[in-house]
Amino acid sequence: MLMRTDPFREMDRIVQQLSGASGTWSKPSVMPMDAYRDGDEYVIAFDLPGVSTEAIDIDVERNMLTVKAERRPAAKGDNAKVELSERPLGVFSRQVMLADTLDTERIAADYDAGVLTLRIPIAERAKPRKVSIGAGSCRKQISG
């Protein structure tokens, strides 16, 4: 159901994780995701802990799904002195090419406990269906 569009994107994600680089709007970090089929819908879950719903943007253009989010630093008091900062901040983005068999007009999005879950129904035309055979007679014409 998903098609990867950039084979080097995974390598970029690994390098960013190892270097600790924060994403920017011009070069966002990749967010981890899971994707699976559950009955008559396709489910994609993105890890976005610490991101508010207002900072998440979901777009679909043709069959390209784009999810962008920004994690900003937590507000600290005037006397606060940072001792350790390991949680990644900045902009996160992921683009996923969706198959034509998905109904992109009816995508549902939920955000709970730092996980953005998109549910995309399988299009009716892509579901298996029975074809009935008519009761009429079948004649074979032979020319000759």
Image (cartoon, rainbow, N blue to C red):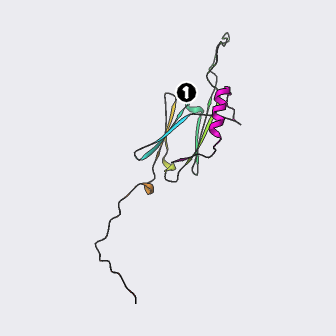
Give the image location of residue 86, x and y in percent: 63, 20
Residue 29 seen anywhere in this rendered image of the structure: no
Please state which of residues 54 and 9 is positioned toward the viewer in this rendering.
9
Crowd tier of the residue under label 1, counting other residues whose Cα lies within 10 Å: few below 14, some 14–19, many 20 or above: few
Please tell me which residue is depicted at 47% across the width and 41% down the height of the picture: 36
From the image, tell me which residue sits under label 1. Answer: 49
Name the kind of residue labelled 1 in the image.
Answer: Pro
Q: Residue furthest front?
A: 144
Relative side of 112 to 3, left or right: left
Q: At x 58% / y 32%, what residue is drawn?
A: 54
Give the magenta part as a residue range. Answer: 1-26
Question: Residue 14 magenta-drawn?
Answer: yes
Q: Choose between 72 and 27: the one closer to the eye.
A: 27
Where 28 sits versus 39, above or below? above
Looking at the image, the residue that sits furthest to the right is 26
In magenta segment, residue 128: no
Residue 12 is left or right of residue 3, and the answer is right
Give the vertical position of 92 relative to 95 (above or below): above
Within the image, what quadrant is residue 9 found in? Answer: top right
| Left or right of 49 on screen, residue 42 | left
User: From this viewpoint, is residue 99 visible?
Assistant: yes
Q: Position of residue 108 (x, y in %)?
A: 48, 42
Question: In the displayed structure, would residue 39 be above or below residue 24?
Answer: below
